[in-house]
């Protein structure tokens, strides 16, 4: 399931060329300028929980997906968290920060301080996230995580030994390309 927004026609064309017609369902969020929780809600009717929710602009080691997907806890949400606070791939001005106590997420946000980890953009979600987001007028994904964290229902999955990068600018793209070239 792919939620599209800006560039939806280009995404649909790419999917049509590279995926089986029955393998990918596209859902369009016409309000793509709204916070990303609105895009998550666009998928609500199609969600088979639990499900992986991943950011399309994050390049991730497949083992990170497997680790988060294999989270065996009873949480309503699990998030891959990287504790390498000095990792050179991270853009400290853009990364979403996380504060955890043990496996429990306590707080999340772009400008959070203090923090002890980074949001990798890989989540294991349940319908509880959709319910939390639907209760808000214009939610961001972090708003939904905060709501579940306040109930003790959001867990961190340690993933700091695995690679990931948020590809938002030319610097990050160059790092991602070098990383992929080294893996081939």
Image: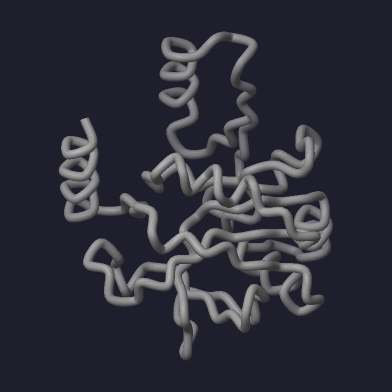
Tell me which residue sits at (41%, 63%) in the image.
Answer: 160
Q: Could you say which is closer to the camera, residue 2 or residue 176? A: 176
Coordinates of residue 54 in the picture (x, y in percent):
54, 46
- Image quadrant where residue 140 sits: bottom right
Name the quadrant of the C terminus.
Answer: top left
Coordinates of residue 132 in the picture (x, y in percent):
80, 62
Name the quadrant of the N terminus.
Answer: top right
Left or right of 133? Residue 57 is left
Coordinates of residue 8 in the picture (x, y in percent):
49, 29
Q: Could you say which is closer to the camera, residue 130 or residue 39? A: 130
> Image height check: is 143 above or below 37?
below
Tell me which residue sits at (40%, 48%) in the image.
Answer: 58
Tell me which residue sits at (48%, 48%) in the image.
Answer: 64
Tell how many labels.
0
> Image height check: is 10 above or below 169?
above
- Image quadrant where residue 180 sits: top left
Coordinates of residue 73 in the picture (x, y in percent):
75, 59
The type of colouring in the image is one colour
Q: Could you say which is closer to the camera, residue 151 or residue 135? A: 151
Tell me which residue sits at (38%, 59%) in the image.
Answer: 161
- Image quadrant where residue 35 sits: bottom right
Left or right of 18? Residue 89 is left
Left or right of 143? Residue 173 is left
């Amino acid at each position: 399931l792919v939620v599209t927004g800006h560039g939806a026609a280009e995404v649909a064309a790419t999917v049509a060329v590279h995926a089986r017609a029955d393998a990918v369902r596209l859902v369009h969020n016409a309000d793509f300028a709204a916070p990303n929780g609105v895009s998550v809600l666009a998928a609500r009717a199609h969600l088979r929980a639990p499900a992986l929710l991943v950011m399309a602009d994050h390049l991730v080691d497949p083992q990170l997906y497997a680790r988060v997907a294999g989270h065996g806890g009873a949480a309503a949400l699990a998030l891959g968290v990287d504790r390498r606070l000095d990792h050179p791939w991270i853009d400290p001005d853009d990364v979403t920060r996380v504060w955890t106590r043990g496996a429990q997420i306590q707080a999340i946000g772009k400008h959070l301080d203090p923090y002890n980890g980074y949001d990798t953009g890989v989540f294991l979600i349940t319908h509880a996230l959709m319910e939390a987001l639907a209760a808000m007028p214009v939610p961001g994904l972090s708003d939904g995580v905060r709501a579940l964290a306040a109930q003790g229902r959001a867990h961190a999955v340690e993933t700091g030994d695995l690679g990931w990068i948020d590809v938002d600018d030319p610097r990050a793209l160059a790092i991602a390309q070098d990383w992929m070239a080294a893996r081939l």
